[in-house]
Each structure stands twice: as structure tokens, then as C-alpha cells.
């Protein structure tokens, strides 16, 4: 049964640098190698690279799409979910995961980090946002140095 | 690749009669036998029966849940999607499918039928709602007499 | 305080006939004359006509918009609410109201009727959908013959 | 017409300190004095204090609620909008505003800040989150020292 597997979300920009692409692909590969299921927003950039990596290792990839049709999914999404709800789909991406790995990203990614932390879902960060409030650092985003460390931490911290 | 398979939604009440349970289970079985993927709202009643049927034939089952946690999914959901959006998840259920099979159901089911028809997604009906407007019958819900006929029609009419 | 006033939703097509326009405008006018607040989907057709009618009598008009910007609101919307959630805003339209008046309309309107009935919000119908299930008529949509009767019934049946 | 007025969102925790309460109330008062309309999430804490302040100066207050009923609105909300969509309503709160004032707050507030910045809606901060990415400070949240400065900046920067 697939639902015994952990669901790990990978979040990040729909456009990204070569380094970020490489990192996302390696994260996707590692998620699949460890037997987990990849959840993402289903579009390009970090999402596509992670799906490509997971697919190359035989993993399952879920893409939760913002628009009205499945055609917008990147070619490595196996399970396209069509929300029709725009950025509100960001909430569904993180709530469907048991841990989240954030790779760089912009304000959309930050919204996903926020919704995950609000819901008690662990967030592992790779070159992504850092938070502070009233000059106090907030350490809720758990840093990782590379793809393997990120996936290991995500699986160790994954909630039920 | 799973995404070459057709995605068929089964919608209906979270509580249902014995006959409806049997019918939903047979629909789920037939969807799996025909190599399609089952999408539903992930809860009990018709949704659970359809997932049980599909699982018994080795099919893939997706449950798009209204609440904040995956624990609400019925035990036959393999891919739980956690929307956190209440009844707005009804829209995601039908938009994620390429055809919809409605089994009996109440007003929540009717909202799913409406959202599907609004989006041009074919709806096959088994003992479900009938519509008319200004004394003119609306024939958009395509009737079926049994599970096999419903699944055959759904697969024949499925959009891309 | 505005919130002592009843909130009445007017739902219907974003395109409509001359008769429907006239009817919607009269419904809007009557809602305002009776001191209630008009809620609608904020776009054209029945929504615009109802807002124009309510505005002409000094009423308050709320438009709950599907897209990403307030510019899509018709010119008679005083309170534009920008959901960014596409058709999921249909749910917010009806849940924000204490009774709903449906004027003709297509499947989007039917989805609003369904969500209202599912949530126990009374629906008054003017030349709109009729429902049946398994050859049994469903009388949940309360018919009205004209604008005054529709608004009177909506205010009498409005929930808290 | 109310829609000539600027819509300013006030966001922050549903529980807050005495200082935050005082600050939010003063922000609400100043929004009303300047003829703007207050948008918020409709619940307690910062939201209630801002609504109380705006109401005391005769301003209009809109509360965009997460749940299924209007009863959850704080007593100073004049226009309750019932979304039924949980935290997805955070997106509607900020997209309905032309500028956002963030007062302290936790991860829910951070999600609202993120969605606003993603959508190009100016965010003014009072003792709230600070952002950085890859050791580079992100200055998108515009700081203010007090309620008057925050409202002045919000009105000056408000988009159309």
C-alpha cells in the first residue's frame, strides 16, 4: 500500500538556477531511493527537477496544480491533482506532506514554509529563507547542507 | 507512468445504503480492472466502498480530503491529499478527474456534479440527481444502469 | 452597525437575458429597500443587475470575486472581496449569506444552490433549476413568482 | 460609494499582548480616521482590537472568516465574510486589501505577509517578522515605528 510510505513535499521556485535544479533533482532522487512519495506544486523549476529525479529512481510523484487543467503539470508528474484554486493550492501541497524540504524559492515558497510551520509540519531548508522576529532569530526552519542530509532529516522528523 | 492512466472520480454520500455500497464497490473494482485511477473525497460511505473495490483489484486510489489531517482518510485510500479547505475540496475532486461517476448522494454530491458540468467534465449517473430548468429537462448527467456500463461510459467520454 | 442587517445573496449567470436583468435589478432594489445587504459573485449579468438595483436604493453591495484583482468587479460593487480561488469562491458567496435568491443561471449557479442547501441556507428560486432524485422531486428550492415575493421569503427564512 | 475608499488589511495573532492590543486598536482608529476600510481575518486578538478601534471612529470593518459560520466573528466586524476554507482565507484577506499592516503575529501572519508580497501588495510591519535569504536581508516588509506612521505608509503605497 502506497500510504505506508512517507509523503515528502519539495517546494521552491518555478524558475531556478542550474545549481538549484541539480540540488532539487538530487533531493527527488533521494526521496525515491528511500521509498518515500514526492509531493510538489506540479509546475517547472524546482518542482520539475525534483519530479525528474524521483521518476528516474522509480518513485511516485504527486503534483498539486494551481490552475484549471492537468496539462500544466511538468512531464514527470504521475499523479496530477487539479485544484482550480490558484495560490491556495500551496496550503494543500504542504498539508499533504509529512515533512517539507524547501529549496531556495521566493514569496510563494515562503507562504508554503509558513503554512507548514503553522500546521506543525517540519520544514528542512536548503539555501532558503531565514526568519527572525523582533531581532530574535526563529530556528524553526531546520538547515541541511545537501540533498542526502535534507531527505534524512525530513524522514526522521516526518509526522504521522 | 501512472499519468497515462485515466483518472475517474467516484462521488456520493459519506453515508449510504447497502445497495449503494455494493454498487460503489463494484464501480471501484471495474475502474481498477480497466486500468484507471480512482479519485474520490477520501471519506466513508460511497467513497470508502469505491476505494475498497479498486484496492481489491490492485488499483490506485486517491482521496482528496476536506480537513486538516490524513487520518480522516478511509483505510483504502493510498494517496491522501489534505486540502484543509472544507467543501471547496469538492471542486478539486472533480477537476482532478477526466470523467465523474455519481452514485446517489445528497447536496454535496450535487455540488460536485455542478462543478464537473461547469468545467466540461462528463458526469455519469447511477441513481442520482436529475436536473431541469424552467420545465425543460437537462440531460447533461448521462445515465447508466449498472457499474460496468458506468465505467465504460466514463472511460469512453473521459476528457484529456 | 451593518451586521444587524440581513445578508442576502443573489446568484445567477454572468450573462443573462433582458428579462433576467430586469428581474435581478428589481430583486436588488427590493433587498436594499428592506434594509438588507446584497452579497453576490461581483461580476456581470445577474450579479451586476442586482448590484445596480441595490445601489440605486442606497443599499450595500458585496462582490466576492473569483480572480486575483478587484478590477473585475462590476461598477456597482461597493465591497470587493478578492478571493484568488476561482470557482471555490462560489462557496464563500453562499456561506456569507443568510438566504440565497437564485435567478435562472447555469451550472455555476447550480453549484451555489447545492453548497447553500448542503449548509442549511435557504434558497429561493426565480425561474431557476429544479431538482429530483430517483424520480422523486426535491422541493428544497423554494419557488417565488416575482422579486418582491423572493425577497420577502428570503428575509422570512434567513438563518442567523 | 464605499469602493472609492482604500482597503487596508491589518494582520496579526488571534492572541496578543496588551501592547499589541493597544497598537492594533490605534491602527484601526487611524485607518477609520483617514477614511479607509479595514479588512482582517475577523477573529480575536489583533483582529478584534483593530476592528474595535476602527468602529470607535465610525469606520467600516470587514472580517474574512476561516470557518463555516458568521458567529465566530468578533463583535466589531460589520461585514462578516464566511469562507469555509480554513487557512486558505488568509489569501483572501490580503488580496482584498490594497496594502497590509502586520502587527507582530506568528506563522499564520507570516503566510499572509508572504501571499501579499507574492501578489505585489505592500506590507508595512510593526514589530513583526524580518526576512533574509542566503544571508541577504530582504527589505520587502516596510518598517513603521507607530500606528500613525504605519497607516500613512500603507495609504501612500496602496495599489489600485
Image: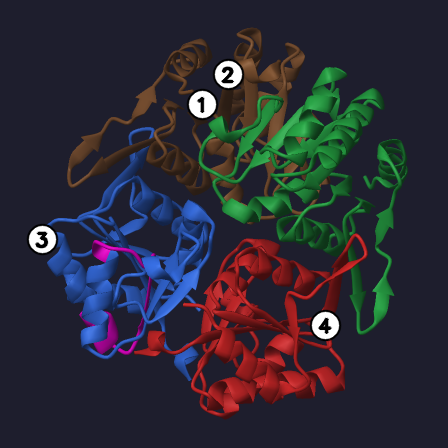
Chain colours: A red, B blue, C brown, D green
> Mark 1 or mark 4, which is nearer to you?
4
Q: Are marks 4 and 3 on the same chain?
A: no
Q: Are marks 4 and 2 on the same chain?
A: no
Quarter holding the C terminus of chain B is bottom left
Image quadrant where residue A37 sits: bottom left
Kindly give the residue lying farthest to the left in the view shown: B18
- Highlighted magenta segment, given as a residue range: B29-46
Q: Chain of mark 2?
A: C
Distance from disc 1 to disc 2, alpha carbons, whole Å, reads: 7 Å
Q: Chain of mark 1?
A: C
Q: Which residue matches tag 1?
A: C98
Q: Are marks 1 and 2 in contact (CB under 8 Å)?
A: yes
Determine whether, in the image, residue D149 is placed left or right of residue C138. right
Distance from disc 1 to disc 4, alpha carbons, whole Å, reads: 45 Å
Determine whether, in the image, residue A99 is placed left or right of residue B98. right
How far from the left and from the top, in percent, is residue C105? 45, 34
Q: Which residue matches tag 3?
A: B18
Q: Which residue matches tag 2?
A: C6
Q: Is residue A33 above or below residue B15?
A: below
Amino acid at each position: 500500500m502506497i500510504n505506508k510510505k512517507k509523503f515528502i513535499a519539495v517546494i521552491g521556485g518555478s524558475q531556478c538556477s542550474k545549481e538549484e535544479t541539480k540540488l532539487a533533482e538530487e533531493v527527488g532522487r533521494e526521496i525515491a531511493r528511500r521509498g518515500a512519495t514526492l509531493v510538489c506544486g506540479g509546475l517547472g523549476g524546482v518542482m520539475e527537477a525534483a519530479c525528474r529525479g524521483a521518476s528516474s529512481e522509480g518513485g511516485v510523484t504527486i503534483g498539486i496544480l494551481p490552475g484549471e487543467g492537468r496539462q500544466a503539470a511538468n512531464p514527470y508528474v504521475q499523479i496530477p491533482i487539479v485544484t482550480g484554486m490558484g495560490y491556495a493550492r500551496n496550503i494543500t501541497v504542504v498539508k499533504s506532506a509529512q515533512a517539507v524540504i524547501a529549496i531556495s524559492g521566493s514569496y510563494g515558497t515562503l507562504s508554503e514554509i509558513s503554512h507548514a510551520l503553522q500546521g506543525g509540519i517540519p520544514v528542512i531548508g536548503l539555501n532558503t529563507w531565514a526568519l527572525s522576529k523582533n531581532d530574535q532569530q526563529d530556528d524553526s526552519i531546520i538547515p541541511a547542507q545537501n540533498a542526502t542530509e535534507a531527505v534524512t532529516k525530513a524522514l526522521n522528523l516526518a509526522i504521522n
